[in-house]
Amino acid sequence: MIEAISFDCYGTLIDWGSGIVKALKPLLISKGIDVEDEEILRLYAELEAKAEGMEYMPYREVLRTVVYEMGERFGFTPSRKEQECIAESISTWEPFSDAVEALNELKKNFKLALISNVDDALLSPTLKKLGVNFDWIITSEHAKSYKPSLNNFTLALKLIGLPSSNILHAAQSVYHDIIPAKKLGMNTALILRKGYSAAPAVSAEADIKVKDLRELVEILR
C-alpha cells in the first residue's frame, strides 16, 4: 500500500528545460553563438552529470562549472557574473501547469516528500511557487551527494521511516531517479514530460508511466 509519494523537483514539478534554455540562450547569443535548444539541453545534461559526479560541491558551484565548461566548448570564457546565470534564474522558473493542483490533491491522502539535486537556498523560492507543505525535503545539500547516488534515496528512506515498498517515487528522469529508486525497492512513476530533457539518456522500466501529474492523481484515487 502506498503511504507516501516522493517527487523529483526540477523537470518533474518545475519546468527546468525552459528555465535552462532561457538562462543560457542570451549568454550564447551575446557571444555570437547560435545553437538549437535541444543541443543546449544535451550539453547541459552531459556537463551537469560530470560535475555532480566529482567530489561534492554545492549546487550553485555545480551550475557555475556547467556554464564555465559550456563556454569552453564554444570557445569563450564566461565571466564570474555570467557563470551565475543559471543559478540566478532558478527563482523565476515556473511549475508545470498540472503541478500545484496535483500536489494539493495528493496531499489529502498521502505524505509527500521532495528529493532534489539543489541547495536549500536555491530551492526556497521554488517551494513558495509549489504552494504545498512537503512532509520531508531532502536536498543534495543535506545528502552531500547528487542523484543518481543511492545515498540521496537512502537518506530519504531513513527520514520517511516507511518500507520502500510503501513509497512511490515520481520523476521525469530515468537517469537521476527511476533507476536508483527501483534499486532500493521503491515503486516508481515516470512522468513523460513533453519536450527535451536535460538529463542523460538511459533506459529502465518504471512501474507506472503517465503523461502528466493529473493522470497520476487519477490512477492513485
Image (spheres, rainbow, N blue to C red):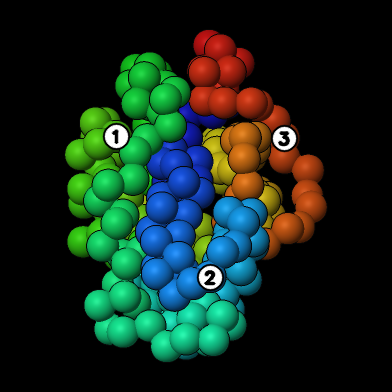
**Residue type at numbered disc 1:** Leu
Extreme residue toward the front, this view: 32
Are the residues flagged by discs 2 and 3 in contact, CB closer than 8 Å?
no
Q: Residue at x 24, y 31 (%)?
A: 131
Q: Can I make out residue 155 in this image?
A: no
Q: Nearer the viewer, mark 1 or mark 3?
A: 1
Q: Can I make out residue 204 in this image?
A: yes
The x, y position of residue 48, in whole percent, is: 53, 71
Reading the image, the residue beneath label 1 is: 130
Reading the image, the residue beneath label 3 is: 207
Q: CA distance from mark 2 to mark 3?
A: 41 Å
Q: Which of the two discs, 2 and 3, labels the residue nearer the N terminus?
A: 2
Q: Nearer the viewer, mark 1 or mark 2?
A: 2
Alpha-carbon neighbours of circle 3 within 10 Å: few (<14), some, or many (≥20)?
some
**Residue type at numbered disc 3:** Asp
The x, y position of residue 177, in whole percent, is: 59, 53
Q: In this rendered view, identify the residue nearer to me: 56 or 194.
A: 194
Q: CA distance from mark 1 to mark 3?
A: 25 Å
